[in-house]
Amino acid sequence: HLWPDPLLAGRLPEQGEPGWLSSALAEAAAAIGDRPVYVTLDIDLVDPAFAPGTGAPEPGGCTPREVLAAWPLFNRLQVVAFDLVEVAPVYDRAQITSLLAAKLVREAILAFGWSYLQRNMHPRQE
């Protein structure tokens, strides 16, 4: 499970229901508050139809659209680091996993960068 806190058990939609990932991340963001966060994304969160190049494929995983739709939730967090792991190009001759990983990293940089600017840029006072 994405957020293994027993206090959240039963309060989140089940995996596969519309919006389950965004709901889970919104709950996590609320629990984390303004503390610094290290975000790690394991590519096997994504269904192997979209990301077959991983050592531990998870049938029934998220679609890329679900993952990308969740990025704006990270604007609520003080993200200090991000990584994306478990991409194994050797298992994906078409390289769609690598392409998706690159897209996810790009979107993460944009989302986290925008969030950083919003928190840290202030109008100059003269």
Image (cartoon, grey):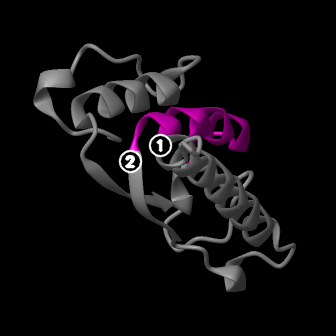
Say which quadrant the N terminus sits in. top left
Q: Please, is residue 54 above or below residue 61 in the view?
A: below
Q: Earlier in the sequence, mark 2 or mark 1?
A: 2
One can see residue 58 in this view: no
What type is the residue that disc 2 sits on? Gln
How far across and how far down the image is residue 85, in percent? 50, 71
Query: In the drawing, what numbered circle is on residue 119?
Result: 1
Q: Where does the image place residue 112, in percent across and percent down from the top left?
A: 56, 51
Q: Secondary structure at mark 2?
A: strand
In front: label 2 or label 1: 1
Q: What residue appears at the point 54 percent right and 25 percent down from the top-left corner?
A: 16
Which one is nearer the viewer's eye here, 108 or 104? 108
Q: Residue furthest bottom?
A: 90
- Residue located beneath label 2 in the image: 78
Rendered image quadrant of residue 8: top left
Which portion, as a residue range, is magenta? 59-77
Q: Is residue 36 left or right of residue 110?
A: left
Q: Which of these two is toward me, 112 or 40? A: 112
**Residue farthest to the right?**
94
